Amino acid sequence: MFEFVRNHTRLALGFMLLLIIPSFIFFGVQGYTRFMGGAGATVAKVDGKAINRNEWDEIYKRYLDQLRQRNPNVDPAQIDTAQTRASVLDQVLRERVVIAAADQLHLYPAPERMQRLFDSEPEYAGLRAPDGKLNRDVLAMQGMTVEMLEQRVAQELAAKQVLAGITDTVPISPSATAAAVDPLLQQRAVQVLTFDPASYRNQVSVDDAQIEAYYKSHQDEFKAPQQATIDYAVLELPALERQVSVTDADLQQYYDDHKQRYTEPEQRHVSHILIKVDKDATAAQRAQAKAKAEALLAELRKDPAAFADLARKNSEDPGSAAKGGDLDWFGRGAMVKPFEDAAFALQPGQISDVVQTDFGYHIITVTGVRGGDVKPFDAVRGEVEASFRRAAAEKRWAEAAEQFTNTVYEQSDSLQPALTKLKLDKQTATVQRDPQPGQTGPLASTKLLDAIFSSDSLKNKRNTDAIEVGPNELVAAHVQQYQPAHVLALAEVKDRVRALLVDRQAQALALQAGKAKLAAVQGGHADDLPPAVVASRGKPAGLMPPVLQAALRADASKLPVAVGVDLGAGGYAVLRVTQVLPRDASAAPEAQIRDQYAQAWAAAEAEAYLEALKQRFKVEIKPGAIGTPAEAASAPAP
């Protein structure tokens, strides 16, 4: 039982996380019922109720913040993409149609059920106050009220009911499952001959007239994107850290003020004897337990060496009694406070008085002490300086950020005033309208690129605003040269066009040869095909996915059977299925595969149901609503 003491603090936190963090991550506590309200253009509608621009920005920002918290080292530009915005909005819409369905079907639990839930369910025990009611102080620490939690839980229960009828009761007949599992595990002997376009390139001849004709008729393929050459300035904590003036006296004072950071945490090796008392025990029962503990303590005062033996015989902590009461090493914060205070007040070999906790009465002895030593200043000087600079930079950040923001705006014809005032380095780059593959850092930020390619930056030659591209990281840019999208001259792309035409003609020759070979094989001329390989979905034997799929789909009622597969730029494949073999014995057990198939079927049904709900509750997404800020700003109002 006392093993719970060790994890008491962590478990309490676990209850908080489990109960307060919602399963629907995007909305905040009141999000589901706050369809209206706020200002801004409409992003989307569900059942006629709008999600406005301000609300969407808040939802999306919260989502990005949660991603950064879970992955603190991720580059914000890599997650803040058009694909991410679309994915998040789709999830928002799915969740809102579920809530709309719950509203229409009256699936919200009655107040009486909610009360019973909070009063009796074990998972809510960590949130109950001593009087049995929800602890408002504990909830307030998480930024919630009792009413907010009740609304959150009621919404989650209602939403689960909307989907439960689909995900929990998908009817799948044994015959249907068997029909699906059989081809999944089936093996086939297949001969494959591939016609690679690369083998036909030496047969292709392309002249200048063909190149020019293709160029003139496909000029959209040879457009250079718009791009801009920019100066830009980055204000970030490392830049401010480098500017911090440091003296030995400063570092020594910082070390003295923060010695706990450079102290090895003290740990105690402790054994104990527990006489357990339930929380609802009577006064008489408590007195009896305490008397037993006092009697054991008296024995130990006479013979301290008998501690382990007495613990094995008398302790009611099943996790440690068999080990003579040994709780191993622990530091501060691992045990409930009365126990911890007693343990850390003892010297090695000392035995405590009887200590009372929520679990009963304890007798504690310390068998070892380690840690607690302060590392010398010289040993941690580098760490102290880094922390000092970081703290000074963080202290200055708000002021520097305001100076940077105001200066690039008020003196918008150049970045130099901001660079000079804040002692920053000017950086240059050539950027395109969209982040380039593999780009990291500020230049991967869609927000910054939106600002760079805005009319104010391009036409009026003004600095962009200070753009937040990451935590404690602001960037402003100034366009020095702009080149709009344009068609490249033939001379610039002639080699590219030639290579493209050669590839296409070689592909056509491979296709022609492959189809001719297929006709020959179907006519019975298959002697020159390679030896057959045995392939299945689980063991593709090196076959390309399109070839494997074609082999497994081929009609095996009359063998051998030959089919052709157009591989596009990869050429053409002729395959001949000669045998259908028993299932692969090394594959997963059929029962396991049937379960996986049933789960996949249930997921597909749920997906279809959600799409049906979208239709039923008339989900609308405004064109360009979740695009870049520049696109959103130019989108017409609803």
Image (cartoon, rainbow, N blue to C red):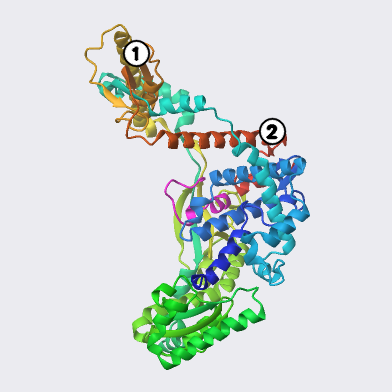
Residue 266 seen in the current view: no
Q: Upstream in the sequence, badge 1 or badge 2?
A: 1
Q: Which residue is mark 2?
A: 615
Q: Is residue 605 above or below residue 335?
A: above
Going by the image, does 335 lie left or right of 533? right
Q: Which mark is residue 55?
A: none
Between 634 and 40, the residue placed more toward the observer is 40
Whether 513 is drawn above or below 475: the answer is above
Q: CA distance from mark 1 to mark 2?
A: 44 Å
Does residue 437 belong to the magenta stretch?
yes
- Rendering coords of residue 545 (x, y %): 37, 29
**Quadrant holding the C terminus:** top right
User: In the rendered structure, which amino acid carries the disc numbered 1?
Assistant: Val
Task: Classify mark 1: residues with Cα within 10 Å, few (<14), some (14-19) or many (20+).
Answer: some
Residue in view at x 72 percent, y 60 percent: 148
Residue under label 1? 561
